[in-house]
Image (cartoon, rainbow, N blue to C red):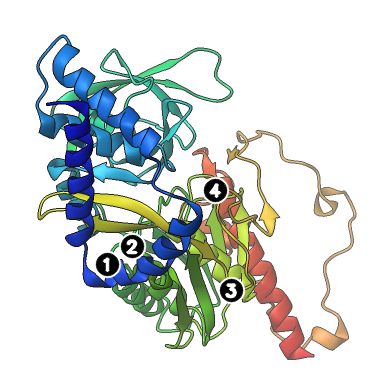
Amino acid sequence: MSKPQYLSVLFFLSLGLISTLPISTVNAQSESISNNSKTEPLPLDILKEFTDAFGSIKTDYVEKVDDKTILKNAIKGMMSGLDPHSSYLDEKSFKHLKEGTTGEFGGLGIEVSMEDGLIKVISPIDDTPAQRAGIQPGDLIFRIDDKSVKEMELDDAVKMMRGKPGTEIKLAIIREGVDKPITVTLKRAVIKVKSVKFRLLEENFGYVRISSFQSRTSEQLKKALKSLVKENKKQSLKGLILDLRNNPGGVLNASVDVTDVFLDNGLIVYTQGRIKDSELRFSASRGDALKGAPIVVLVNVGSASASEIVAGALQDHRRAIIMGASTFGKGSVQTIKPLTRKTAIKLTTALYYTPSGRSIQAEGIVPDIKLANVSLEAKEKNLFSQIKESDLKGHLEHKKGKASSNKSNKSPHNSKKTSDNNSGDAEDDNEPRDYALHEALNLLKGLNILGAKKTTK
């Protein structure tokens, strides 16, 4: 086939593609197409380059390649030249995407993106091979089973990491602060993501962990809050820690519904893009399930996308204190546009904005209280305790003052069971402790004490 014929075929394919788009999509884009056509004529010189390359592959490449493969590779290249989150989804990738949003899929349990030709870990998912193996947000994977990932397509790398449950895979990673590369061997598994976990840290203070945002996450959250109240002797909680660390995101509507659980009203998030259909606004309407009780939201660099929407909205409405490290900064909206029944493209079509108009993209959510990435360990028991006033010979005995003689001297500081004796959080416990969680609980207690004093006055 001559080169002019290739150009004709390409033009025909282009017309065929546009005609098969949904009518709503064509209408939404028609204005931008007609406006741009006046100033940006069809780049025939680039189209000629494409057809020349197509012809050379067909006639000169060392092995025979069929037209379908060349054109599919052209689509992949077209998508990879955009942003890291736009991609072509072949039959297997499209299927995996659907599985991932429903909560069960096979693989390692790791959310990744591309950075400088390497695979960057956004976040490991709770209770998965990746999390149990110690994979951390920010890790750079440069080899998968001794095969370099340099310049590899992200989808191809993801396919390599997926596989039959029970089979092993070896990852070579680079970690900030570690001099030598780290090699980790993991065993693939069917990933069943439990979106919401919860427990009562101690009396009146609850903890909810959301590991990802799925279609039923808000329902699970509401059930968790009811269970916490029931466990708290049917008394309302005086504070809640919402843990969004290492939460890579998920379904947009799920993040909106989760935020709605904690707000009486007001804007949650809005999106803006080039086409009219990309401009959306989501607002709260269901009422605050905690009735104003203080919330501390824990975030880190592994908190991305939907997690940032929740944190940003609660921060803007001054409904929660955000604590931890600055988040990942994925503030873009991806739309899945099916090409056939089995293939699609994932295309970035808009950006997220918090209620106050802040863009999340490449900035993330900056916490109100920043915490260092450290862990806590209790001191070893000292055989010799420090000397106190009561140990001194001839010390004066403790006596109650007149003002408090008829009172039980109860205060938020003097509960019959202190926090140090609950939830395995005792001072003599030698297990490493979660520093961020520890600080968040202390903050909630402080807010509760302050609130109690104001009420007393």
Q: Which residue is labeled 1 in the image? A: 215
The x, y position of residue 72, in whole percent, is 19, 36
| Amino acid under disc 4 | Asn
Closest to the observer, 454 or 358 = 358
| Amino acid under disc 3 | Pro
Q: CA distance from mark 1 to mark 4?
A: 23 Å
**Pointer 1 with pointer 3, Cβ within 8 A:** no
Q: Residue at x 19, y 61 (%)?
A: 19
**Pointer 1 with pointer 2, Cβ within 8 A:** yes
Q: Nearer the viewer, mark 1 or mark 3?
A: 3
The x, y position of residue 56, in whole percent, is 22, 18
Q: Which residue is labeled 2 in the image? A: 251
**Quadrant holding the C terminus:** bottom right
| Amino acid under disc 1 | Ser
Q: CA distance from mark 2 to mark 3?
A: 19 Å
Q: CA distance from mark 1 to mark 2?
A: 7 Å
Q: Which residue is labeled 3 in the image? A: 355
Quarter of the rendering containing residue 75: top left
**Pointer 2 with pointer 4, Cβ within 8 A:** no
Q: Which residue is labeled 4 in the image? A: 300
Q: CA distance from mark 1 to mark 3?
A: 23 Å
Helix or strand or loop: what does disc 1 sit on?
Answer: loop
Helix or strand or loop: what does disc 4 sit on?
Answer: loop
Helix or strand or loop: what does disc 3 sit on?
Answer: loop
Q: Nearer the viewer, mark 2 or mark 4?
A: 2
